[in-house]
Image: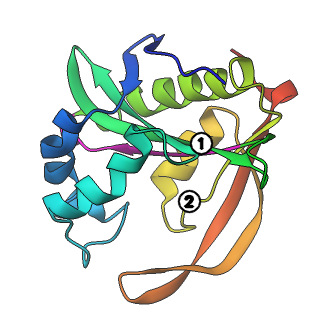
């Protein structure tokens, strides 16, 4: 499966993450307001953690690819695309996505919606996925609203799905199918 160099849609350009993005990632992943919606405010991330976490995907050693979201030629966040594969490395037709807009000045400007639509289009038309899904915390109403706006449908609740800020929390399971996506 080929990986594009750039994906463009309206307000955003998505390009593969590079090591030079680790400094801005460090800033985003240590911003208390951003982390309220992401990893949690109780988990500051070191630059070393960022290197160890993201370098394998940059080198193509995982099923995940991370894309920097740019708006007005500036990095504003990232989106992750994880292609599910079987033990033989064959694509199973399912892609999990996750997104972070780290630049708070760009929140609520349609950037997340554009980036998600671009990644969904990539998953369906380049990767040939049948299903794209994500698992937001049920308390992240702002994210869930964006996901529904771009076409994701709630399928159910994953009870005590993850530990967030020291407590077990429920996540929603949301998906969009190939036939439901309107480009």
Is residue 179 shown left or right of residue 125? right
Q: Earlier in the sequence, mark 1 or mark 2?
A: 2
Q: Which residue corresponds to the image point at 26% horizontal and 75% vertical from the top-left?
A: 43
Indicate the colouring scheme.
rainbow
Is residue 158 shown left or right of residue 162? right
Observer-nearest of 49 and 183: 49
CA distance separating discs 1 and 2: 9 Å
Disc 1 vs disc 2: Cβ atoms closer than 8 Å? yes
Position of residue 75 measured from the top left corner of the image (x, y, whole percent): 23, 28
Label 1, on which residue? Answer: 147
Is residue 107 shown left or right of residue 122? left
Q: Secondary structure at mark 2?
A: loop
Position of residue 105 measured from the top left corner of the image (x, y, whole percent): 19, 36
Q: Which residue corresponds to the image point at 79% horizontal and 52% vertical from the top-left?
A: 86
Q: Is residue 146 above or below residue 134?
A: above
Say few, some or many: other residues with alpha carbon within 10 Å of mark 2 (under 14 / 14 to 19 / 20 or more). Answer: many
Position of residue 77 measured from the top left corner of the image (x, y, whole percent): 31, 37
Looking at the rendered image, the quarter that the N terminus falls into is: top right
Q: Main secondary structure of the magenta part?
A: strand
Residue 59 sits inside the magenta stretch: no
**The residue stretch that appears in magenta:** 95-105
Q: Is residue 66 above or below residue 126?
A: below
Label 2, on which residue? Answer: 136
Say few, some or many: other residues with alpha carbon within 10 Å of mark 1 (under 14 / 14 to 19 / 20 or more). Answer: many
Observer-nearest of 64 and 133: 64
């Amino acid at each position: 499966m080929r990986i594009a160099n750039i994906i463009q849609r309206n307000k955003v350009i998505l390009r593969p993450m590079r090591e030079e993005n680790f400094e801005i990632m460090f800033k985003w992943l240590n911003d208390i307001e951003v982390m309220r919606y992401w990893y949690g405010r109780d988990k500051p991330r070191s630059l070393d953690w960022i290197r160890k976490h993201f370098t394998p995907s940059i080198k193509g050693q995982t099923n995940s690819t991370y894309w920097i979201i740019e708006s007005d030629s500036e990095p504003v966040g990232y989106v992750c695309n994880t292609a599910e594969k079987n033990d033989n490395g064959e694509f199973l037709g399912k892609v999990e996505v996750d997104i972070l807009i780290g630049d708070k000045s760009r929140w609520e400007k349609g950037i997340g919606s554009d980036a998600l639509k671009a990644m969904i289009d990539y998953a369906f038309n380049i990767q040939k996925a049948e299903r794209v899904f994500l698992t937001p915390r049920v308390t992240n109403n702002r994210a869930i609203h964006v996901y529904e706006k771009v076409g994701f449908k709630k399928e159910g609740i994953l009870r005590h799905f993850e530990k967030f800020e020291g407590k077990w929390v429920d996540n929603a399971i949301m998906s969009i199918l190939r036939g439901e996506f309107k480009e």
